[in-house]
Amino acid sequence: MKWPFRLRSAPPLDALYRSIVVQAREPAWYEAGQVPDTTDGRFDMVALVTALVLLRLESVGTPQDSVDLTERFIADMDGSMRQLGMGDPTVGKQVGHMVSALGGRLGAYRDALGGSADLAEALERNLYRGTVAPEALAWAEARVRDLARRIDAVPLDTLRQGSL
Protein backbone atom coordinates (compact mmCIF):
# COMPACT_ATOMS: atom_id res chain seq x y z
CA MET A 1 0.00 0.00 0.00
CA LYS A 2 1.23 3.47 -0.84
CA TRP A 3 1.29 6.09 1.85
CA PRO A 4 -1.31 8.73 0.88
CA PHE A 5 0.63 11.69 2.27
CA ARG A 6 4.03 12.92 1.24
CA LEU A 7 6.59 14.11 3.70
CA ARG A 8 7.35 17.73 3.09
CA SER A 9 10.89 18.90 3.18
CA ALA A 10 11.80 22.02 5.10
CA PRO A 11 11.35 25.27 3.18
CA PRO A 12 14.52 26.64 1.58
CA LEU A 13 16.78 28.38 4.11
CA ASP A 14 14.60 27.20 7.00
CA ALA A 15 17.65 26.46 9.17
CA LEU A 16 19.02 29.92 8.44
CA TYR A 17 15.74 31.57 9.36
CA ARG A 18 15.53 29.56 12.59
CA SER A 19 19.04 30.79 13.46
CA ILE A 20 17.93 34.35 12.79
CA VAL A 21 15.05 33.95 15.23
CA VAL A 22 17.34 32.41 17.86
CA GLN A 23 19.69 35.39 17.52
CA ALA A 24 16.77 37.84 17.71
CA ARG A 25 15.52 36.18 20.89
CA GLU A 26 18.82 36.41 22.77
CA PRO A 27 18.00 37.94 26.17
CA ALA A 28 20.86 40.44 25.99
CA TRP A 29 19.02 42.41 23.30
CA TYR A 30 16.13 42.93 25.70
CA GLU A 31 18.20 43.37 28.85
CA ALA A 32 21.38 45.32 28.04
CA GLY A 33 19.97 46.63 24.76
CA GLN A 34 16.61 47.50 26.31
CA VAL A 35 14.68 46.46 23.20
CA PRO A 36 11.05 46.35 24.32
CA ASP A 37 10.05 42.77 25.08
CA THR A 38 6.77 43.14 23.23
CA THR A 39 5.33 41.78 20.01
CA ASP A 40 6.59 44.88 18.20
CA GLY A 41 10.01 44.68 19.84
CA ARG A 42 10.39 41.04 18.90
CA PHE A 43 9.33 41.80 15.34
CA ASP A 44 11.87 44.63 15.19
CA MET A 45 14.62 42.27 16.33
CA VAL A 46 13.71 39.57 13.80
CA ALA A 47 13.56 42.23 11.09
CA LEU A 48 16.97 43.60 12.16
CA VAL A 49 18.74 40.24 12.05
CA THR A 50 16.92 39.23 8.85
CA ALA A 51 18.05 42.50 7.25
CA LEU A 52 21.67 41.85 8.24
CA VAL A 53 21.53 38.39 6.69
CA LEU A 54 19.82 39.74 3.55
CA LEU A 55 22.63 42.28 3.20
CA ARG A 56 25.13 39.41 3.30
CA LEU A 57 23.11 37.44 0.75
CA GLU A 58 23.02 40.48 -1.53
CA SER A 59 26.80 40.49 -1.62
CA VAL A 60 27.57 36.77 -1.93
CA GLY A 61 24.34 34.86 -2.50
CA THR A 62 22.02 34.43 -5.41
CA PRO A 63 18.84 36.44 -5.91
CA GLN A 64 16.96 33.23 -5.09
CA ASP A 65 18.60 33.12 -1.65
CA SER A 66 17.13 36.52 -0.83
CA VAL A 67 13.74 35.49 -2.19
CA ASP A 68 13.76 32.25 -0.19
CA LEU A 69 14.70 34.00 3.04
CA THR A 70 12.09 36.70 2.51
CA GLU A 71 9.43 34.07 1.81
CA ARG A 72 10.40 32.27 5.02
CA PHE A 73 10.07 35.56 6.91
CA ILE A 74 6.62 36.09 5.36
CA ALA A 75 5.47 32.58 6.30
CA ASP A 76 6.61 33.13 9.88
CA MET A 77 4.87 36.51 10.15
CA ASP A 78 1.69 35.02 8.67
CA GLY A 79 1.74 32.19 11.19
CA SER A 80 2.46 34.57 14.06
CA MET A 81 -0.47 36.82 13.15
CA ARG A 82 -2.77 33.83 13.00
CA GLN A 83 -1.55 32.65 16.43
CA LEU A 84 -2.43 36.09 17.76
CA GLY A 85 -5.98 35.44 16.60
CA MET A 86 -6.11 37.57 13.46
CA GLY A 87 -8.33 36.37 10.67
CA ASP A 88 -7.70 36.11 6.94
CA PRO A 89 -8.78 39.64 5.97
CA THR A 90 -6.45 41.20 8.53
CA VAL A 91 -3.48 38.84 8.18
CA GLY A 92 -2.69 39.69 4.57
CA LYS A 93 -2.73 43.41 5.23
CA GLN A 94 -0.60 43.10 8.39
CA VAL A 95 1.94 40.84 6.73
CA GLY A 96 2.13 43.30 3.83
CA HIS A 97 2.98 46.06 6.31
CA MET A 98 5.60 43.83 7.92
CA VAL A 99 7.26 43.05 4.59
CA SER A 100 7.27 46.75 3.78
CA ALA A 101 8.82 47.44 7.19
CA LEU A 102 11.50 44.83 6.50
CA GLY A 103 12.28 46.53 3.19
CA GLY A 104 12.57 49.91 4.88
CA ARG A 105 14.85 48.52 7.56
CA LEU A 106 16.96 46.76 4.95
CA GLY A 107 17.57 50.10 3.23
CA ALA A 108 18.22 51.93 6.49
CA TYR A 109 20.70 49.34 7.76
CA ARG A 110 22.38 49.06 4.34
CA ASP A 111 22.97 52.82 4.34
CA ALA A 112 24.08 52.91 7.97
CA LEU A 113 26.48 49.99 7.75
CA GLY A 114 27.76 51.29 4.43
CA GLY A 115 28.64 54.60 6.03
CA SER A 116 26.17 56.89 4.27
CA ALA A 117 23.85 57.17 7.29
CA ASP A 118 24.09 57.00 11.06
CA LEU A 119 23.48 53.54 12.55
CA ALA A 120 22.39 54.95 15.92
CA GLU A 121 19.68 56.99 14.19
CA ALA A 122 18.55 53.98 12.16
CA LEU A 123 18.34 51.87 15.32
CA GLU A 124 16.54 54.56 17.28
CA ARG A 125 13.92 54.85 14.53
CA ASN A 126 13.58 51.18 13.54
CA LEU A 127 14.49 49.12 16.59
CA TYR A 128 13.35 51.39 19.38
CA ARG A 129 10.69 53.38 17.48
CA GLY A 130 11.69 56.52 19.35
CA THR A 131 13.10 57.11 22.79
CA VAL A 132 15.89 54.93 24.13
CA ALA A 133 18.47 55.35 26.87
CA PRO A 134 21.84 56.42 25.44
CA GLU A 135 23.71 53.50 27.03
CA ALA A 136 21.25 50.98 25.55
CA LEU A 137 21.55 52.58 22.13
CA ALA A 138 25.35 52.52 22.31
CA TRP A 139 25.25 48.87 23.38
CA ALA A 140 22.89 47.95 20.52
CA GLU A 141 24.94 49.85 17.95
CA ALA A 142 28.14 48.03 18.96
CA ARG A 143 26.30 44.69 19.03
CA VAL A 144 24.76 45.24 15.57
CA ARG A 145 28.14 46.16 14.09
CA ASP A 146 29.69 43.06 15.65
CA LEU A 147 26.86 40.83 14.45
CA ALA A 148 27.09 42.25 10.92
CA ARG A 149 30.86 41.57 10.90
CA ARG A 150 30.32 38.01 12.11
CA ILE A 151 27.62 37.35 9.50
CA ASP A 152 29.84 38.81 6.79
CA ALA A 153 32.62 36.39 7.77
CA VAL A 154 30.46 33.28 7.40
CA PRO A 155 30.95 31.43 4.10
CA LEU A 156 27.82 31.33 1.97
CA ASP A 157 27.26 27.56 2.18
CA THR A 158 27.67 27.66 5.96
CA LEU A 159 25.24 30.57 6.17
CA ARG A 160 22.69 28.73 4.05
CA GLN A 161 22.90 25.82 6.51
CA GLY A 162 21.95 28.11 9.36
CA SER A 163 25.20 29.14 10.99
CA LEU A 164 25.41 32.76 11.93
Image (spheres, rainbow, N blue to C red):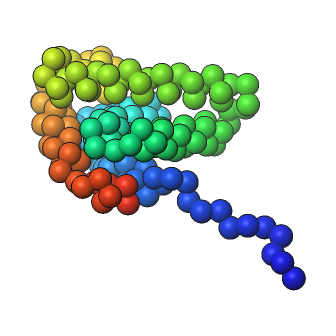
x, y percent for residue 24: 35, 45
Residue at point 38% right, 43% down? 62
Q: Quadrant of the C terminus?
A: bottom left
Residue at point 73% right, 67% down? 6
**Closer-to-camera residue (61/115):** 61
Relative side of 79 to 140, left or right: right
**Closer-to-camera residue (72/56):** 56
Residue at point 22% right, 54% down? 154
**Closer-to-camera residue (121/128):** 121
Q: Is residue 87 above or below residue 122?
A: below
Tell me the quarter of the picture where residue 58 sits: top left
Asked if one can make out residue 31 in the rendered structure from this viewpoint, the answer is: no
Relative side of 123 to 95, left or right: left
Tell how many labels. Answer: 0
x, y percent for residue 10: 56, 59
x, y percent for residue 145: 15, 37
Residue at point 27% right, 38% down? 59
Q: Quadrant of the N terminus?
A: bottom right
Asked if one can make out residue 125 in the rendered structure from this viewpoint, the answer is: yes
x, y percent for residue 143: 17, 40
Relative side of 111 to 84, left or right: left
Relative side of 163 to 18, left or right: left
Instruction: Pick out the residue farthest to the bottom.
Output: 1
Instruction: Pick out the residue farthest to the right.
Output: 1
